[in-house]
Amino acid sequence: MDDILITGSSAPQVHELIHKLNHIFALKQLGKLDYFLGIEVQYLSSGALLLNQSKYIHDLLCKTDMENSNSIGSPMVSSCRLSKFGTDSMSDATLYRSIVGALQYATLTRPDIAFSVNKVSQFMANPLESHWKAVKRILRYLKGTLDHGLLIHPSQTGPPFSLRAYSDSDWATDQDDRKSVSGSCIYFGLNLISWSSKKQQVVARSSTEAEYRSMAHTTTELLWIQSLLQELKVPFRTPTLLWDNLSVVALTHNPILHSRTKHIELDIHFVRERVISKQLQVLHVSSTEQLADLLTKPLSPAKYASIRDKLKVYSHRVPP
């Protein structure tokens, strides 16, 4: 049995498609969308949708006997630096892998835990007690934000729609191999539609290199989204805006490569080609307004909550 969602801007065409499919396959229509593959859909009075996984997360809390645990303001301590060395091995590695795998699915509607879940996912082979402690903190954070989810606004303007992205990195923060973390978030209009928190594959020799590798990854994702929108015939504004720090912005506008940047020449040319062709405009954003910051490092609860709101993660009880 397969589940499928059919949506569109024209109700008659949607009904016509369902009618044609029903002639070929045995379909069971369940009416207005309210629950799909563990994702709950709530309709707010403003016309917005709130996607959350409260039941799914509650089941995780019950599985780990943490449904009555005390909640906490952030999923990871700001000073946390996990390593594959240091403490005893966890007694039940299977439980660790099961819970972390389930948390990965929870990031579908909770971009606010993407970094912390990505971090604990790196120790699946040999989880330690310190890693399990970090997982339990994520669960305690989710316990306190059980009713939070991803807010989807109706469009407030007509086409063409805006497409913008934020890119960031945290240089050489991995305690074991000194690789950096890339983070990005992409907005279509008011809505967050794509986000990423990922350890880079090679060691960056400078913070600028780490930032540029993150920007190249974000640019690739932007190009794919642009291609998808064109295929769907959805008009969007060009150039796409990409926000990053000053050193990277300067490098995208400066065609001269010196000895410190030759080793990332491919990434530089890849991004610069998009800047020259007017597909991409790279702009500076201050560290206080960098929304991808939450996807690259653990933050204090106050700063964490501030950026979480900008990532469109809200409670249905306190609508924006």
Image (spheres, rainbow, N blue to C red):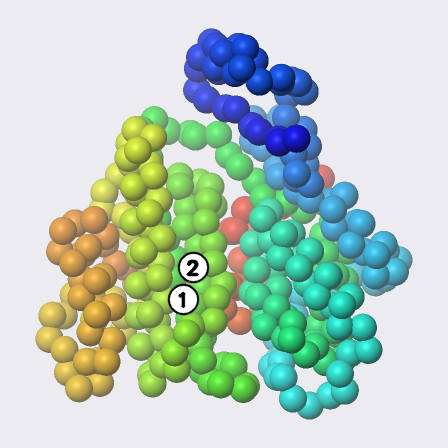
SS of the residue at dot 2?
strand
Q: Nearer the viewer, residue 201 or 54?
A: 201
First in residue order: circle 1 vs circle 2: 1
Give the label on residue 34, or none. none
Q: Residues within 10 Å of mark 1 (few under 14, many from 20)?
A: many
Determine contact: label 1, label 2, CB under 8 Å: yes
Name which residue lies at 70% across and 66% down. Answer: 97
Give residue 279's position: percent from left, percent from top: 21, 49
Give the distance between the C-alpha atoms of the residues marked 1 and 2, in whole angstroms.
Answer: 6 Å
Q: Amino acid at mark 2?
A: Ser
SS of the residue at dot 1?
strand
Q: Is residue 42 above or below residue 111?
A: above
Q: Is residue 287 visible?
A: no
Q: Nearer the viewer, residue 102 or 71?
A: 102
Give residue 80's position: percent from left, percent from top: 63, 79
Give residue 291's position: percent from left, percent from top: 46, 59
Name which residue lies at 46% across and 44% down. Answer: 193
Residue 143: name its quadrant.
bottom right
Residue 202: name its quadrant.
bottom left
Which residue has dot 2 on it?
A: 184
Q: Nearer the viewer, residue 286 or 253?
A: 253
Q: Is residue 277 above or below residue 151?
A: below
Name which residue lies at 74% across and 50% down. Answer: 57
Give the label on residue 168, or none. 1
Q: In the image, 304: left or right of 63? A: left
